[in-house]
Amino acid sequence: MKLFYISVIFITNIFTTFAQTTITVDATSNHKAISPWIYGRNNSISDDPAKPVSVAQWKLYNDAGLRMYRENGGNNSTKYNWKLKLTSHPDWYNNVYMHNWDYSATSLLNSTTNTQGLYAFQLLGKAASSTAYNFNDWEYNQDHGYVNLNSNWAGGGGPVAYGGNGGNGDPNLYLKNWNADSTAKILDQWFNILSLDKSRLTYWNMDNEPEIWQSTHDDIATSAITAEEYMQKYFAVAKAVRAKFPGIKLVGPVSTNEWQWYTWNNSKVKDPTDGKLYPWMEYFIKRIAEEEAASGIRLLDVLDVHFYPSTENDPATTLQLHRVWYDTEYDYPKANGVKVTGDSGWDNSITKEYFFLRCDQWLTKYKGAGHNITFSISEYGTIANNGSENANVVACWYASHLGVFSNKGVELFTPWDWYKGQWEVLHLFSKYFGEVSTSTTSTNDNIVSGYSSLNKNGDSLTIVVVNRDQNNAQNVTIDIKNFMPSETSVTGYRLSGLPSEETFVSNTENALQAAQYTIDENKITFSAPKLSVTLIQIPTEQAIPTATQYKTMLNLVNIFPNPAKNLLYIDMNDQSMYQVILQNMLGQTLQTNNLVGDQHLDVSAYPAGQYILQIIQNENSVVKKFVKE
């Protein structure tokens, strides 16, 4: 590995220059499995067989540790026709172009291992059908530059001088009706005909940014649909795809930005059944819970939003954006939608966002504490000036998010914009960070944060320290609890002083600075440079049991007999409590039981056929299938 080695040397008077930060790590507390799918990105793969991703580019992706590939194209996914491999581009006159998702998904599976692809289902009701009615974009743009790109000129529209009718085009010429069944049949195509690996294509976005369809897809969404109309579209597709793929992970509602987290068509949502007003995301959660209760079909697995805070010229706010999601004390200076009250009221004193925590509270309110819904950000951008960004600010912003999302169990994170500094941080975390988060606190968390993890065997503790101070180094003491290091000098890696050009080339050529850190009485003391990310690995000979080990034990659970006629026995590995959910192949829940140790279920009342048994324990789960005779 091409590394810059540095010596960790301390002079006593340096420690008096700045306040001391103490980061306390408890290796036995608050274990939570870290999702590998937070190591993601948008738009990494070509969907054109004539323009394949190069071998060198695939090597960069794999070396950097890219795990989650969101390849549905955002707004371009809403009118995707998987049969003809066409989509209508709302940001390019609505012209229709080829997009071969079959090819991109296949190339992903063939070129990587242990990765996931994130594609999308269409909910709006129309899909591209023909390239024959595209506006003459080439000639027009040659004469005028890239202007009027959002104009609805496909389908015979546009200036007369360029073959148009002087107005908007006719969407019926380039679109066709596309119902829930049409959308769901991509699963037949991929898993029954192409035999793609469904275990690596498990997550699916439920379309994209429905709150602004009236703007992005105004060729057919000529007036704003109501939130309830959207919910009905969502339910129809969710039920259709769940019936074909019971183990699917539905990722929705793919909400546009902070304003749209709380509003639909710029106001709160009035429930037609009770007449009350709700923030949009609360209404979405409420309706999901109601429809699940009525149908018995699980309709949401991952609650997903987009975030474009536009802090390009405000690095101080960028460096605190990780606090938007769970921090109840953070006064977010760009808070906006959260201030909407009543029908059209506004309370400027509301500045605390903690959005994912709010959503978890709503989920608990409407679905109960065991809702098992996780969180996702599938687009994130406009936090820096691309091309002239400070890679060190980006590195601290990104590392802070990966640290918080590791600690909180966020499931997916795929930034849309990608800046210098991100490849370095992605590589640092995906290569060296562990699989199970542990409790970590800081006495100066707004400036210096710590994030810690254990590897899956519990015999290595990794601690990341992020110093967000733009001007000063910070003196840090890491206090390690309930963990016995087996060495007094351990290896660490640091990102700091990143230059203006991209530095990550591969896992052997990058900007990581290696150093040795001394452990004295279970403490490590060092100086963290300004705008730096430091990772330290500590081995032990006394392994800590982890949630990942519990998950491995859960995977060893046995059910028998299979097929079963009357009683289905569950052979557990321990005497801890667990939950069992029995579902049919449509995903409808038939019964739920909280059990301890070896138990059995009476399935005699159910008709013959295949069934699904979901066993949940210690925030982990395993799915077993069985046949009822």
Image (cartoon, rainbow, N blue to C red):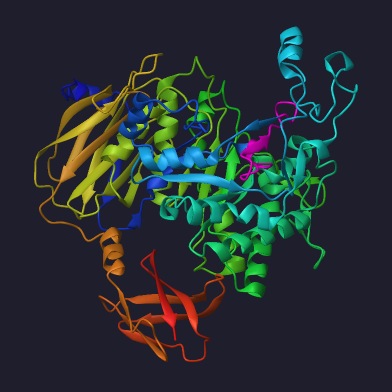
Measured along the vertical axis of the image, is residue 286 above or below residue 122?
below
In this orientation, does residue 49 appear?
Answer: yes
Instruction: Look at 79% across and 40% down and name the residue there.
Output: 214
* Rendering quarter of residue 309: top right
Q: Measuring from the top left, give residue 290's x and y in whole percent.
A: 67, 69
Q: Measuring from the top left, give residue 363's x and y in whole percent.
A: 58, 62
Q: Does the magenta stretch include residue 185?
A: no
Instruction: Look at 22% across and 61% down and name the residue there.
Output: 545
Please provide the residue range marked out in magenta: 75-95
Quadrant showing the C terminus: bottom left
Quadrant showing the N terminus: top left
In this orientation, does residue 329 appear?
Answer: no
Q: Which of 242 and 188 is in front in this view?
A: 188
Q: Nearer the viewer, residue 26 or 215?
A: 215
Q: Measuring from the top left, give residue 168's x and y in whole percent.
A: 87, 29
Q: Left or right of 274: which side holds 417?
A: left
